[in-house]
Amino acid sequence: MPVLVGFLQRGDVLAIVVKFDDKRGGEPSPSLDALHGLVSDDLARVNALILKEMDSPVALIPQLAGHIIAAGGKRLRPMLLLGAAKLCGYAGDRHIGLAGAVEFIHTATLLHDDVVDESDLRRGRSTANAVWGNQPSVLVGDFLFSRSFQVMVRDGSLKVLEILSNAAAVIAEGEVMQLTTANDTSTSEAAYLEVITAKTATLFAAATRLGAVVADRPKVEDEALEAFGLNLGIAFQLTDDVMDYAADAETMGKDTGDDFREGKVTLPVVLAYRRGDAEQQAFWRRTLEELDQNDNDLPRAIQLLEGHGALKDTLDRARHYTQLARDSLDIFPAGPTKDALLDVVAFCAARTH
Amino acid sequence: MPVLVGFLQRGDVLAIVVKFDDKRGGEPSPSLDALHGLVSDDLARVNALILKEMDSPVALIPQLAGHIIAAGGKRLRPMLLLGAAKLCGYAGDRHIGLAGAVEFIHTATLLHDDVVDESDLRRGRSTANAVWGNQPSVLVGDFLFSRSFQVMVRDGSLKVLEILSNAAAVIAEGEVMQLTTANDTSTSEAAYLEVITAKTATLFAAATRLGAVVADRPKVEDEALEAFGLNLGIAFQLTDDVMDYAADAETMGKDTGDDFREGKVTLPVVLAYRRGDAEQQAFWRRTLEELDQNDNDLPRAIQLLEGHGALKDTLDRARHYTQLARDSLDIFPAGPTKDALLDVVAFCAARTH
C-alpha cells in the first residue's frame, strides 16, 4: 500500500485514488456499501472529474488538493447526490459534474477548517496545513472553491448555481458563528444546532436536493430530498461529536479527544456543562475556554460526559434527526435505491459501534 | 473624523462609508476625479449594495468586512466597471450588482492575502487579521466570496458567471504561484509577470470587460475593454511594486518597505538581483529568502535598486502596459467617459509622484 509523505507527483495522486477505490472494494464500510454498489460507475466518473478539475500548471495545487482529496474521504456528499438523482430516475450526465462541485466545496471547507482549527491530523493523516503550512491551504482552498463554481457554470443552470452559492454563504456564516461559540461553554443547545445546521447539514441538503433538481422532479420531491439531506447532516454531525469522545481511533480514523484538545464546545459538552455543579463547570471552563489541559483531563471529561448521560442523550438527539431523514423519503417508491439511502442513514447513526 | 479601533457596531460601519465619501469629496485624488464625478451616483448605489450584502445575523461578519471595506479603498475596480459600462452607453441596472460582486471578490482576496502575508498593516490601518486574528479573516473572506456569487447569480447571466468564476480561479492560481516565487530571488521576469497578471490584472480585466458585456456590445468592444483592464492592472501592480521602495507613507497609505520586510520578490528586485554582483546577490538572498534583516538593510536595498536603475526600469515596463491600455480604447469615440478612463491610466502610472 503506497504511503503518502510530503509532496506528491501527479502520478501519485492518481495512484492514491486507485487505492481509495481498492479500499472501498476490499474493506467496505457495511452500511454505505449498498449505495456505493448502485452508484459505483457514476462515482468513478466523479473521481475522474475531480482529478481533472483539480489539475493546474501550478504544481502545488494538485499536490495539496490531492493530499486532502485522497485522505480517506468517503465521498459521502457526492454519493448522496448520485443516489438522490438515481432515486429520481435521472438518466443524464449533469449529476457527475455537480457531485464533483459539491466535493470541491467540501474540500475547500476542510482546508480552511484545518487552518482555523490549527489541526495537525485529519482522519489519522497529516493535514495539508501541517505538511505545507497555512498559506497554501488557504489559497488552494480558494482555488477549489472557484473551480467548483466554474464546474457549476458549465452545468448551465441558474437554479443549481443559486442552490450552491446560497449553501456556500450559509456554510461560511456557520463557520464564523462557530468561532464565536467555539470556546464558550455557555453555548446553548439551540445556538449549537444552528451552527452545525449551517456548517455541515446545509451541504448535505444541497447535495441531495440537486438529485431532484437535475431530474426536474416536482417541488414535493425537491423538498423531500432537501429535508432528507438536512436531517441526515445534523445526525451525522451529532454522531461525529459523540465519536470524538468515544471512538476507537484505529477504526474511525479520527483521534479521540480532538474536539476536546481544540476546546470545541459540542453538544455533549453543552449538555454536561449545564448538568454539572460549580466545580465541574470550572473544569470545563479551564480545559475548553482557557485550554489549560493535562493528561488526566480527557479521561475526566469522558467520565463527566458519561456520568451526565451527555453522550447517550446526544445520540438520542441524533436519532431524532435520522428518523426525520428516514420519514422524508416516504413519498418515494420502495426499491433498492431508497433502501440504500436508508442504509446511509443507519450508517451515519451507527458510527459509534 | 471618526477613528476606527477594534470592533464596530453596524451604525459605525455606515458612518465609515460616509466618511469615505466625504474624503472623496474633500481630498480628491486628482486623476481619479473625472471618473468619480461621472459615476458618483452609480458608485453610491454600489456602496449601498455592498453595505446591504455584507450584512449577516452573525455580527462578526459585518464588523470585520466593514473594517476592510471601509479601509481607504478607492473602489477602483467597481469604478472601472461603472466607467466601462458608461463608455458602452449602458442604461440599465446590472452594473451596480456586478460592481459590488467584483469588490467582494477583491475584498475576500485582500483578507486572505493579509493572512498569507501575516500583514499587520494595510494602507496604514491595522489589518483584519491583526485585529481579530487569522480565523475570522479566512472565514469572512469565504463568506464575501460566496456572497459575491450569490449577487452574480441574481444578475442571472451565465456569461457573467463564467467570466467571474474563471477570474476567481485564475486569481487563486496566481496567489499559489506567488507563494512559490515569494522568497525566491532567482524568479524570472516572465514568471513574475505571470503572477501579477493572474493575481491582479485578471480582476481588472473582468471588471472592465463586464461593462461591455452588460451593454451587450460587439465582441470587438468586449475584447478592447478586457485588454484595457488587463494592461492597466499590470501597470498598476508594477507601479505599486516601485511605490513600496519609494513611496511617502503619509500620502500613499502604504508603508515603504512592506514588500521588503515580507521578503517579496517583485520586479525591481528581480532586475537588481540579476544585475548585481555576488556580494549583492548574497544580500538579497539573506534579506529576502532568509528574512535575516537589520535596520540598515532597507536603505541598502533602495540604494541597490536605484544603482541598478531597477525602479526606473520597472516604471518603464509599467509605461509600456499603460500605453497598451490607452491604445485599447482607440475604437471608442472621444468624450468625457473615455477621457476619464484615460485619466485613470495616468493616475495608475503616476502614483509615485
Image (cartoon, coloured by chain):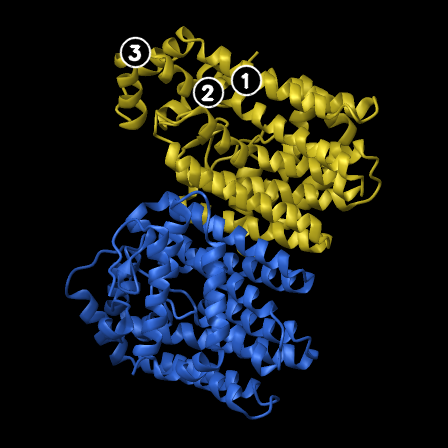
Chain colours: A blue, B yellow
The residue to which callout 3 is attached is: B277
**Under tag 1, what secondary structure?**
helix
Measure how far apart labels 3 and 1 are at the Cα level. 23 Å
Residue ranking furthest to the front? A11
The residue to which callout 1 is attached is: B317
Measure how far apart labels 2 and 3 are at the Cα level. 23 Å
- Residue at 41% across / 53% down in the picture? A112
Q: Quadrant of residue A36?
A: bottom left
Circle on res. B156: none
| Sequence order check, earlier mark of 1 and 2 | 2
* Camera-nearest label, 2 or 3: 3
Residue A76 shown left or right of residue A302 in the figure: right
Residue ranking furthest to the left? A295
Give the residue type that dot 3 points to: Asp
Circle on res. B244: 2
**Under tag 3, what secondary structure?**
loop
